[in-house]
Image: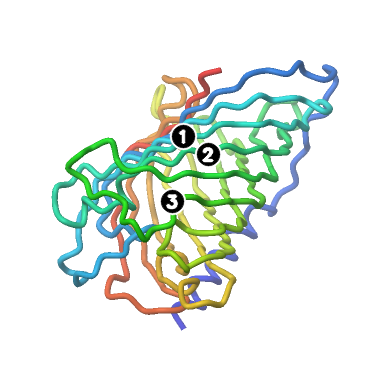
């Protein structure tokens, strides 16, 4: 019953994304020149329960406290096919590191580097209000990427076991959506969505555990209240992660769950380039296939996305 309620909540959040019409920007500038692009994203956070990758054998009460830095760097060469569609080969480097010193903070799935080489076909579609002002956008992409998992740079962390697959082919589609509407002076309504459907030959899992088809949907809906150069933004967040394949390893809890709950963030966008947020969240957790002891999580930290080139 709780799972149905949680999925219904996420459905309601998704409905909110199409509740009002938007107008896409009409291009009139011609086809942009090909260019080198580099972005750095990141999330440095504490989480009570590392739901995304947790595989510890210890009990839920003992398995607490992760201090994780996730730092992906993306370098691509964008070749525009028209005003908003481009093809791009890219190189992606992703660092994951857990700064805690307990046994569960040393595992390889919290402490590794992933190097990826791939290509994407993407579209950049901005939204405009009736006055022609930018109010967000939708950015879909198809991609294919070959990934290599390497051990942590920190010698105190666990190495990658010999029986773990360290290469992965990943392919699928993703979308980033953001939209806001001004409701008054210093006050606006906003919504965001990250979504991805991806096939993996492995999830950097034990040898023999192959083929994953994972859907990830993370919607947020909130309001923004201006505080000088900053903005306070309370919101409701949902997350649905589900592996659609049917082997035993496709039913693990860290790839089949629903999260939902309140959060709040302090936006520093007016002070810094890109997007920078200090945030805190309290989330309930429901599992789609197998039960787990922990059914809630607390998470807080700093997330950012910075365009370098």
* Residue at the limit of the structure toward the front, as seen here: 162
Location of residue 179 with respect to 276 vertically, above or below: below
Q: Do residues under tags 1 and 2 come within 8 Å of each other at their CB atoms?
A: yes
Disc number at residue 116?
Answer: 2
Q: CA distance from mark 3 to mark 1?
A: 15 Å
Residue in the image at 53% along x and 67% along y: 242
Name the N-terminal-most of marks 2 and 3.
2
Tell me the residue that label 3 is attached to.
166
The answer to which quarter of the image holds residue 31 is: top right
Q: Do residues under tags 3 and 1 come within 8 Å of each other at their CB atoms?
A: no
Position of residue 237 measured from the top left corner of the image (x, y, whole percent): 46, 55
Location of residue 230 with respect to 137 vertically, above or below: above
Position of residue 79 measured from the top left corner of the image (x, y, whole percent): 74, 25
Q: Nearer the viewer, residue 182 or 90?
A: 90
* Residue at the limit of the structure toward the bottom, as seen here: 1
Location of residue 309 with respect to 68 vertically, above or below: above
Disc number at residue 216?
Answer: none
Tell me the residue that label 1 is attached to.
93
The answer to which quarter of the image holds residue 19 is: bottom right
Circle 1 residues within 10 Å: few <14, some 14–19, many ≥20: some
Residue in the image at 47% along x and 44% along y: 148
Name the N-terminal-most of marks 1 and 2.
1
């Amino acid at each position: 019953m709780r799972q149905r309620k949680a999925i219904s909540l996420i459905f309601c959040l998704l409905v909110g994304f199409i509740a009002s019409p938007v107008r896409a920007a009409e291009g009139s500038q011609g086809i942009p020149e090909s260019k080198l692009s580099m972005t750095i994203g990141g999330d440095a956070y504490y989480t009570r329960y590392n739901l995304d990758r947790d595989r510890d054998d210890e009990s839920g009460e003992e398995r607490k406290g992760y201090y994780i830095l996730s730092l992906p760097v993306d370098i691509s060469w964008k070749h525009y096919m028209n005003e908003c569609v481009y093809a791009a080969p890219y190189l992606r480097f992703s660092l994951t590191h857990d700064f805690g010193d307990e046994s569960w903070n040393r595992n390889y799935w919290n402490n590794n580097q992933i190097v990826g080489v791939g290509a994407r076909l993407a579209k950049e579609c901005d939204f405009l209000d009736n006055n022609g002002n930018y109010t967000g956008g939708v950015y879909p992409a198809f991609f294919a990427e070959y990934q290599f998992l390497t051990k942590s740079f920190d010698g105190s962390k666990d190495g990658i076991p010999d029986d773990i697959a360290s290469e992965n082919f990943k392919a699928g589609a993703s979308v980033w959506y953001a939209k806001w509407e001004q409701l008054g002076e210093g006050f606006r309504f906003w919504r965001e969505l990250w979504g991805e459907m991806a096939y993996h030959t492995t999830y950097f899992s034990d040898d023999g555990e192959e083929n994953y088809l994972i859907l990830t949907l993370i919607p947020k809906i909130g309001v923004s209240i201006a505080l000088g150069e900053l903005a306070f933004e309370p919101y409701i967040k949902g997350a649905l992660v589900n592996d659609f394949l049917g082997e035993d390893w496709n039913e693990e809890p860290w790839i089949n769950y629903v999260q939902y709950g309140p959060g709040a963030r302090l936006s520093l966008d007016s002070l810094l380039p890109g997007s920078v947020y200090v945030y805190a969240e309290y989330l309930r957790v429901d599992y789609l296939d197998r039960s787990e002891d922990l059914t809630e999580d607390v998470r807080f930290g700093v997330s950012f996305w910075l365009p370098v080139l």
